[in-house]
Amino acid sequence: MEVEASDEDFWERVSSAEPSQGPTPLHTPRSPSELPQSPHGVFLSQPASIDEPLLLLDEDRVQERHEAERVALHEELEEARRTGKADRAAAEAMSDKVEELQREREDTCREKHRLEKENEVLRLQLQDHHGIMAAEWGQTLQFQERLRQEEAEVERLAFEVAELRAALVLRDEELGHLRR
């Protein structure tokens, strides 16, 4: 009876373990009903071979290794999901920044075109101003030349007036001598 209870515990542990992925090298029964039936009812609750418990231990190790791999893969998947979520958030932030920079670039281009037009208008006004200044400078030079000529004429006339006055004074003196 005690042997049967320990066998039942054994079969419960075996049946509660997760089934392994893929085929097992030897068929290991999962329940007492899978055991081969003896015509005389002997060894009904005993393993089919003496190596079967060892194989079950090996299978437990394989299942533990698979479980550890599954847990590691699950953790890796969760980490990849977190990383992916962070990457998507970063990409969205970058996308927003790119859109903002594009708007700033467009605003800057509009401002540049406005300033270029204004610069062209000012350049034309400056050219007109230079033309006006050149014309005024030409007139100023002409006025200066005419002023020099007139000053020279005034000097010449002043010199003539001085000569004529001196000549007049000499004549008045001669006349005054002649009258005396």
Image (cartoon, rainbow, N blue to C red):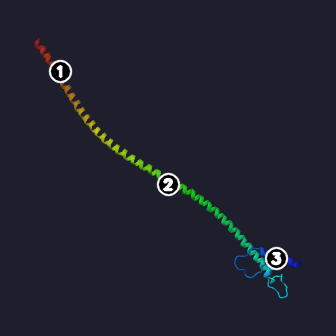
Looking at the image, the residue that sits furthest to the left is: 178
> Residue 158: which quarter of the image?
top left
Residue 14: x and y in percent read 78, 76
Badge nearest the viewer, 1 or 2: 2
The mark nearer the N terminus, 3 or 2, is 3
- Quarter of the picture containing the C terminus is top left
Residue 120: x and y in percent read 37, 47
Image point (62%, 61%), residue name: 85
Image point (59%, 58%), residue name: 90
In the image, residue 35 above or below residue 73: below
Distance Cα–Cα, label 3 vs label 2: 71 Å
**Along the line of sight, the residue nearer the viewer: 156 or 70:** 70
Distance Cα–Cα, label 1 vs label 2: 90 Å
| Side (left or right) of 89 relative to 127 | right
> Residue 160: which quarter of the image?
top left
Give the residue number, with chain letter if any, for mark 2.
Answer: 102
The mark nearer the N terminus, 1 or 2, is 2
Identify the mark at residue 165; answer none if there is no mark.
1
Q: Amino acid at mark 2?
A: Gln
